[in-house]
Amino acid sequence: QHNPHWWGNRNTIVHLFEWKWSDIAAECENFLGPKGFAGVQVSPVNENIISAGRPWWERYQPISYKLITRSGNEQEFADMVRRCNDVGVRIYVDVLLNHMSGDFDGIAVGTAGSEAEPSKKSYPGVPYSAQDFHPSCEITDWNDRFQVQQCELVGLKDLDQSSEWVRSKLIEFLDHLIELGVAGFRVDAAKHMAADDLSYIYSTISDLNTEHGFPHNARPFIFQEVIDHGHETVSREEYNQLGAVTEFRFSEEIGNAFRGNNALKWLQSWGTGWGFLASGQALTFVDNHDNQRDMGAVLNYKSPKQYKMATAFHLAYPYGISRVMSSFAFDDHDTAPPQDEQERIISPEFDEEGACVNGWICEHRWRQIYAMVGFKNAVRDTELSNWWDNGDSQISFCRGNKGFLAVNNNLYDLSQELQTCLPAGVYCDVISGSLVDGSCTGKSVIVEDSGFGYIHIGSEDFDGVLALHVDARV
Ligand code: ARE
Ligand code: CA
């Protein structure tokens, strides 16, 4: 179940982390559809526990499968899915099949008003009781298969997916979402479930809903969160036949390279040459909602210049099923999404240029990022050719005769004639500006009959990347 069922020539998923359904519906119509985004990964849709201060992570603690969260109710969810599908933008839901909530003193009340008694593993809203869970134990050794799959991930009550009842409840939940028109699922904590159990669930759920524009017999797209840095007892290879797998090594290595810890010339063999999964099995990202919060090599919106360069490379290089992150501003691991005094999530607001202003970062609305979503659409089905590098961290390459990317991550200028592979003409660099009424607001590049053009990226330029493609010809 590796096919994301994208519409037309579209290619890129955006994770609208913690957004409300009504805001996503509007975003599909006003921005994502027009800019050529292929789909949205949405935050968990089912009822969750309420934690003090309303950290984002409370949504990873299910109380029931009722579709009521701080993002909206079932009717708002259904409306969003329909409106997004209507403009060719698919919805992928983050689903929690591994566990229910963590421990809680006494009776917990969820976002739909269901009561649960987590300490007794009692979740009447489903209903689940103690027999539906693995006996409690802690994961202390991440290379012990039993612990990883049958103990409690950060203390979250661990469901037994080999049980008929649990399977039937999970399948019913997924089928409900399919009925409402979603295109697939991000499977949270997949490594913590036996691949055989997941295989049963994935193969038993319904085909996608043809009333939402999906072809007959279309199987739901599955991408599984498996964190595998190599040398894991439970490895990505147990899951990649079932569906796509999040390729965390991609995120770590691209962060490393664009932070300057690795010369960009090595990216010539990016992809399987770096030990990553086959392109069609790899869900790729510069950062995700977890690792953007960790200290380390992974880049996030807080290093904008490097982040935009890494994203441009991510979307220009022909590898992976790409997802871009759209964050809210955070100080630490627990920061709640933008909310009002009543702890309701607030809607994003935009300035004249379309950038978000009220606590939402909206990387997907940064010109340098959505322009590369357009680039990836424009160069779809072309191969990479004419790799050039300066022996260090200045690189360029072509995508057929449709697109050209150059990057300068050295502390000196890139200034020279380079092969762009494009038909002769004048092209607008979609990074430094855009094509407005036939003229370019950023750098223009004249491509000669030979395909060569003069490329300049100063080390002090606002952005360290330049991108040309056939849909942005002056
Ligand atoms: C919260 C509190 C905890 C508390 C718990 C239960 O922070 O202190 O014990 O609640 O009350 C998210 C947050 C957690 C949060 C949880 C539930 O990140 O902080 O716990 O929600 O609210 C492993 C898993 C991987 C998992 C990561 C976080 O393999 O699947 O840990 N990622 C997913 C999601 C998370 C989410 C969960 C799972 C739970 O993306 O957002 O947690 O639904 C090595 C290993 C990896 C390991 C990694 C990090 O790299 O190889 O396997 O990832 O370290 O520990
Ligand atoms: Ca488990």
Image (cartoon, helix red, strand yellow):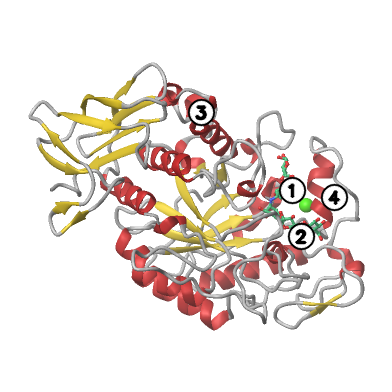
Residue 53 located left or right of residue 89? right
From mark 2 to mark 3, how far is it between C-alphas? Answer: 39 Å
Q: Are marks 1 and 2 in contact (CB under 8 Å)?
A: yes
From the viewer's side, name the closer residue of 459 and 419. Answer: 459
Q: Amino acid at mark 2?
A: His
**Dot placed on the residue nearer the N-terminal end, 2 or 4:** 2
Report crowding for label 1: few under 14, some 14 to 19, many 20 or more residues within 10 A (C-alpha). Answer: many
Residue identified by numbered label 4: 151
From mark 4 to mark 1, how far is it between C-alphas? Answer: 9 Å
Is the residue at mark 2 in contact range of ligand 1, meaning its CB lies under 8 Å from it? yes
From mark 2 to mark 4, how far is it between C-alphas? Answer: 10 Å
Residue identified by numbered label 3: 260
Q: Secondary structure at mark 3?
A: helix
Residue identified by numbered label 1: 192
240 w.r.t. 79: above or below: above
Residue identified by numbered label 2: 99
From the viewer's side, name the closer residue of 204 and 23. Answer: 23
Image coordinates for residue 410, horizontal then vertical, percent: 41, 26
Report crowding for label 3: few under 14, some 14 to 19, many 20 or more residues within 10 A (C-alpha). Answer: some
Q: Are marks 2 and 3 in contact (CB under 8 Å)?
A: no
Q: Quadrant of residue 469?
A: top left
108 w.r.t. 38: above or below: below
Report crowding for label 4: few under 14, some 14 to 19, many 20 or more residues within 10 A (C-alpha). Answer: many
Q: Amino acid at mark 4?
A: Cys
